[in-house]
Amino acid sequence: MKKLVFIFTIFLSLSASAGLNYYDSITNETGYQLKSALARLLKSTHRSQSYGALFRVYSETDADLTYDKDGSIMDMYSERAVSSDPYTFKPNQKRCGTYKKEADCYNREHLFPQSSFNKRSPMRSDIFHVYPSDGYVNNRRGRLAFGEVSNADWTSRNGSKVGTNTFEGVKTKVFEPIDEFKGDIARALLYFATRYENNITGFSHEWLDGSREQVYKPWFKRLLLKWHKQDPVSEHEVNRNNKAYSFQKNRNPFIDHPEWVTMIWKAN
Ligand SMILES: [Ca+2]
Ligand SMILES: [Ca+2]
């Protein structure tokens, strides 16, 4: 019943934001043709905003109305989904700035590292992969790939880890977010792979395979598919997608249509 109510809520919030009409140009494509059709739609509707505007809009797009419901900044690197947060940031206060430890200030975390595309626009200010996060944890993550860690070299106060990857035996240094946000991060990176498929062969990161279609290396693609399945779309993501749509005029299609992920990227 709870699930039904949630699905109905998604339907209502989509209707309210005219999100349902957004996909009218998508008909019966599948596979990488679906991805390219989405790329055209996401690009043609994208209204790029300034980098500074992100800090201002976070008070709407990233207010915590789901977990603690206190309107503080919902930061995936400090939020504790099932117990009280170690610290919180009030919107428009404690923007970084310099930091020496967690809780000093928050800044803008590029899930797809901005050094990969030389801080160019519109990627740098694209809200669908740029999230508010604690400055110190953001810096600890740096441009590390995401992965899974058994023995952490360092753990943030909400349980995010830095250490050697154990997923599929690819032993590089990685950052592992808490379970609650693994799907959120996967869907953001799949959005990025879709929106920028015509530019991404010129970007540089260890998780890229050099193709415009699959985009990510096989192990990393399988990690994202695993996380997408393991952590389904949440109420917070649906709200964020609708508010980000008002701001930037495009959407993350994998939040609206989770089934498109496996219609595009095959499991192997
Ligand atoms: Ca919170
Ligand atoms: Ca989640």
Image (cartoon, rainbow, N blue to C red):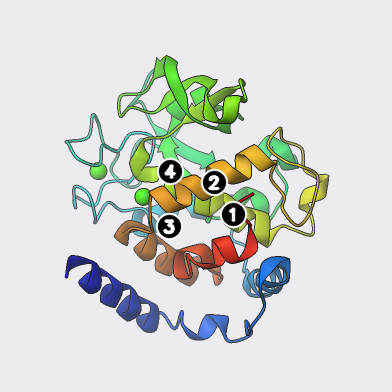
* SS assignment at label 3: helix
Q: Residue furthest front?
A: 268
Q: Nearer the viewer, residue 138 or 21?
A: 21
Which residue type does callout 3 highlight? Val
Q: Quadrant of residue 169?
A: top right
| 4 or 3: tag closer to the N-terminus | 3
Which residue type does callout 1 highlight? Leu
| 4 or 1: tag closer to the N-terminus | 4
| Number of the label disc, if any, that sits on residue 57 | 3
| Number of the label disc, if any, that sits on residue 182 | 4
| Number of the label disc, if any, that sits on residue 190 | 1
Residue in the image at 60% along x and 66% along y = 263
* SS assignment at label 2: helix
The residues tagged by marks 1 and 3 sit, at their Cα atoms, a distance apart of: 23 Å
Figure check: 148 above or below 6: above
- The mark closer to the camera, 4 or 3, is 4
Residue 74 x/y as whole percent: 32, 46
* SS assignment at label 1: helix
| 2 or 3: tag closer to the N-terminus | 3
| 1 or 2: tag closer to the N-terminus | 1
Residue labelled with disc 2 = 224
The residues tagged by marks 4 and 3 sit, at their Cα atoms, a distance apart of: 23 Å
- Label 4 lies in ligand 2 vicinity (Cβ under 8 Å): yes
Badge 2: residue crowd in 10 Å (few <14, some 14–19, many ≥20): many
* SS assignment at label 4: helix
Badge 3: residue crowd in 10 Å (few <14, some 14–19, many ≥20): some
Figure check: 168 above or below 179: above
Residue 79 x/y as whole percent: 30, 38
Which residue type does callout 2 highlight? Leu
